């Protein structure tokens, strides 16, 4: 029993020392510590919600002391008196403004003092009591009251404009529904604007295709004749880079995303000249633009150069040839050929047209050599 009583006494002493230490630190921090302090009473005629003992006292935003007491006046139910302890060097005058503020949006309540004129008289004490500073009538409105007032004004605005707001929301809903139904058209319009202004992604061009010249000719004795091959004649339909499809009713269309490397007459002329060169049977073959005085002129005309999709895809090529010299027309002939196509796709269509053209070009070269 004696040991237990001794332990209880030691524990009580240690707890008392700990409490005394906390009290001493609190006194140092909030009531001025060891130095001299100036005491003032602040009188409020309105609510000061959240103001507690130890609350900071700020003068122009600088901490100068703390609240040491908060009391009610039994004689005046609306009055609250707060006692503050501040640094004696704080320039508190008779015109110093007293307010209640908050540290941060939801922080602790603080006393905020704002300095006045430098020549204003100092606050004096009466009957040995601390000097008194009286707060204004609008002091003490807290954030909750301000928020309630704001919400009340917002509710009034919404109530007065309920019908226009409902109309506006309905219009926005209809506009959004219209955008959803016409999204593809809007995307196309935006794409067109991007292409017009040059800000859109580069558009991939059509595939480019060429014809080939004939290379497999039999070996014969070469001729010394000179032949010039001018630009072939063609109607506007064939004088383009389009790879044509001819429908059953005689109408024409073009293969999507594909075109010839040059206008068709220029392409036919170039490959016919190359075919003659590959045959090695003439003394000279050229174009009139190359300023070669040729004995003969091979005049070509494109009659047909298209793919027929029905009943089964096939290429049709027809070219007329007329061999002319200074003495007159040495001969004239129509050459034609067809070639089956696997499909109407660009690659298959070009392969069939190239095969039919090679057949016609070989006929033209052989006929020319025989006529000469």
Image (cartoon, rainbow, N blue to C red):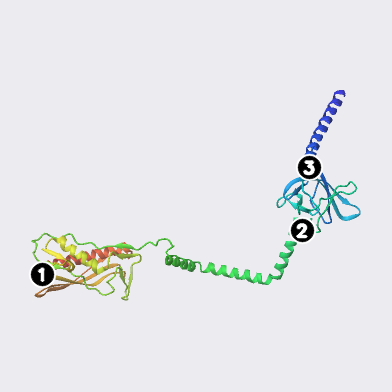
Marks 2 and 3, Cα distance to the nearest angstrom?
A: 29 Å
Determine the image quadrant of residue 245. bottom left
Determine the residue positioned at 16% across, 63% down. Answer: 276
Marks 2 and 1, Cα distance to the nearest angstrom?
A: 110 Å
Q: Position of residue 3 (x, y in %)?
A: 85, 23
**Quadrant holding the N terminus:** top right
Label drawn at residue 246: none
User: Callout 2 environment at 10 Å: few (<14), some (14 to 19), or many (20+)?
Assistant: few
Marks 3 and 1, Cα distance to the nearest angstrom?
A: 122 Å
Q: Secondary structure at mark 2?
A: helix
Choose between 18 and 256: the one closer to the eye: 18
**Quadrant holding the C terminus:** bottom left
Residue located beneath label 1 in the image: 295
Choose between 62 and 300: the one closer to the eye: 62
Which mark lies nearer to you, 2 or 3?
Answer: 3
Label drawn at residue 145: 2
Q: Secondary structure at mark 3?
A: helix
User: Callout 3 environment at 10 Å: few (<14), some (14 to 19), or many (20+)?
Assistant: many
From what the image shows, is residue 31 above or below residue 73?
A: above
Determine the residue positioned at 14% across, 61% down. Answer: 279
Determine the image quadrant of residue 255. bottom left
Q: Earlier in the sequence, mark 2 or mark 1?
A: 2
Q: Position of residue 132 (x, y in %)?
A: 84, 51
Label drawn at residue 30: 3
């Amino acid at each position: 029993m004696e040991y237990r009583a001794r332990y209880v006494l030691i524990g009580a002493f240690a707890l008392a020392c700990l409490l005394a230490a906390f009290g001493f630190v609190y006194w140092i921090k909030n009531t001025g510590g060891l130095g001299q302090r100036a005491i003032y009473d602040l009188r409020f005629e309105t609510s000061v919600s959240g103001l507690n003992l130890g609350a900071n006292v700020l003068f122009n935003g600088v901490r100068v002391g703390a609240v040491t007491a908060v009391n009610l006046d039994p004689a005046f139910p609306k009055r609250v008196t707060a006692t503050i302890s501040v640094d004696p060097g704080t320039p508190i005058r008779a015109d110093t403004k007293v307010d209640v503020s908050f540290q941060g949006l939801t922080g602790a309540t603080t006393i905020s003092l704002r300095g006045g004129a430098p020549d204003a008289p100092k606050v004096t004490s009466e009957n040995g009591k601390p000097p008194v500073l009286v707060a204004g009538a609008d002091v003490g409105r807290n954030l909750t009251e301000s928020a309630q007032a704001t919400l009340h004004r917002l509710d009034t605005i919404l109530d007065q404009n309920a019908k226009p707001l409902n109309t506006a929301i309905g219009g926005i809903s209809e506009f959004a529904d219209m955008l959803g139904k016409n999204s593809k058209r809007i995307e196309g319009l935006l794409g067109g604007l991007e292409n017009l202004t040059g800000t859109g992604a580069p558009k991939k061009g059509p595939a480019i295709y060429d014809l080939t010249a004939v290379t497999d000719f039999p070996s014969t004795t070469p001729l010394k004749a000179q032949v010039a091959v001018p630009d072939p004649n063609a109607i506007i339909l064939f004088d383009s880079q389009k790879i044509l499809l001819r429908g059953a009713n005689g109408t024409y269309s073009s293969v999507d995303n594909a075109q010839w490397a040059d206008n068709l007459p220029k392409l036919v002329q170039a490959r016919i000249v190359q075919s003659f060169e590959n045959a090695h049977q003439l003394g000279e073959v050229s174009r009139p633009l190359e300023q070669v005085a040729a004995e003969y002129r091979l005049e070509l005309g494109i009659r047909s150069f298209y793919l027929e999709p029905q009943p089964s895809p096939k290429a049709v090529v027809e070219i007329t040839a007329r061999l002319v010299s200074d003495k007159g027309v040495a001969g004239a002939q129509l050459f034609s050929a067809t070639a089956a196509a696997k499909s109407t796709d660009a690659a298959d269509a070009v392969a069939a047209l190239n095969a039919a053209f090679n057949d016609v070009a070989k006929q033209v070269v052989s006929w020319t050599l025989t006529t000469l």
